[in-house]
Amino acid sequence: MRMEPPPLPLRLAAERVSAELEALYDRLERLEYGLDMVFMHTTEALDGQTISMLQELDMLRQSLGALADFLVHLARDTNECGLVNPEEALRSVPLRDMAVRLGGKTKAEPVSGHAELF
């Protein structure tokens, strides 16, 4: 007969998830570094699609790091009733659009259709 694991405080569960996100961040950072080394030793210029893919990879890495920081702030600031004021955690998110979404707001799309530069 399989025993159920004991209940886990939300704070501890969130800290564990944050640690996993940080580990993914580190793995993506190593991948980016490896790709940089490969591209530094190539004689061919990178095409636009390759550059776009590298930028997307960097945005994924930044997003994982921001989510990890946000989550660990939430975990540490949660009160005994399970409530949290997200303002401090939102200040830890350097990506503006993500911070807006995590704050429960929606942001209008840019009129020009250009992506936010990072």
Image (cartoon, helix red, strand yellow):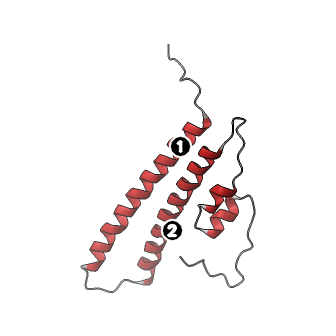
Q: Which residue is mark 2?
A: 59
**Which residue is the extreme one toward the top?**
1
Q: Which residue is mark 1?
A: 15
Crowd around label 2: few <14 · some 14–19 · many ≥20 (10 Å): some
Mark 2 / mark 1, whichever is N-terminal:
1
Q: Is residue 80 above or below residue 1?
A: below
The kind of residue on which mark 2 rests is: Met
Where disc 2 sits, the SS reads: helix
Asked if labels 1 and 2 touch by Cβ distance under 8 angstroms, the answer is no
What percent of the width, then of the height, locates residue 27? 38, 57
| Residue that appears at 50% across and 59% down | 65
| Residue that appears at 43% across and 79% down | 51
In this rendered view, identify the residue nearer to me: 37 or 89: 89
Q: Which mark is residue 118?
A: none
What percent of the width, then of the height, locates residue 67? 56, 56
Eye-nearest disc, 2 or 1: 1
